[in-house]
Image (cartoon, grey):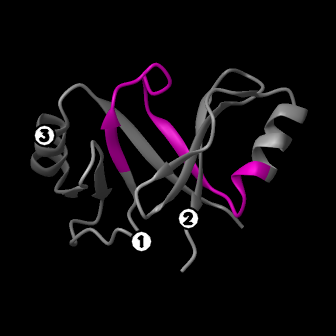
Amino acid sequence: MTRVKFELPADDLGRASAFYRDVFGWSTQQLPFDYVLVDTDGEPVDPQDSDGGISPRTEFVQGPVLIIDVPSIDDVAQKVADAGGALLNAKERVGDFGYSQYVKDSEGTVLCLWESIQD
């Protein structure tokens, strides 16, 4: 079974974090790089179990993106390509947390594949 999270793009991570905290009561945690983890229940953010994040707006992340937790990005990326999707970037390491890769589905929707680093 896969787990699905979300990613919201922002031009100003601090301003976006304040917006979601003030309007919806979400908890946020700035990481040591340009990314903010989000928990929608208002409890302190658990980096291993967050609901999603706020990222800088990029060429791939222009609107909300679903993050799909997969056991192996390499395996799933190949399935994406075989099923008529597109790979938008190479697999990238994200700190000590895991790896990500942006893809498009067969209809052009941008998704983010996520593979956690296993201890």
Q: Where is the C terminus found, in terms of image quarters?
A: bottom right
**Magenta highlight range:** 53-74
Mark 2 or 1 closer to N-term?
Answer: 1
Q: Nearer the viewer, residue 94 or 111?
A: 94
Residue 116: give its label: 2
| Residue carrying label 1 | 48
Q: Position of residue 40 (x, y in %)?
A: 30, 59
> Type of residue at label 1?
Gln
Q: Position of residue 33 (x, y in %)?
A: 27, 47
Mark 3 or 2 closer to N-term?
Answer: 3
Q: Is residue 14 above or below residue 30?
A: above
Mark 1 or 3 closer to N-term?
Answer: 3
Q: Residues within 10 Å of mark 3 (few under 14, many from 20)?
A: few
> Type of residue at label 2?
Ser
Identity of the residue drawn at 83% across and 41% down: 78
* Residue 104 picture quarter: top right
| Residue carrying label 3 | 14
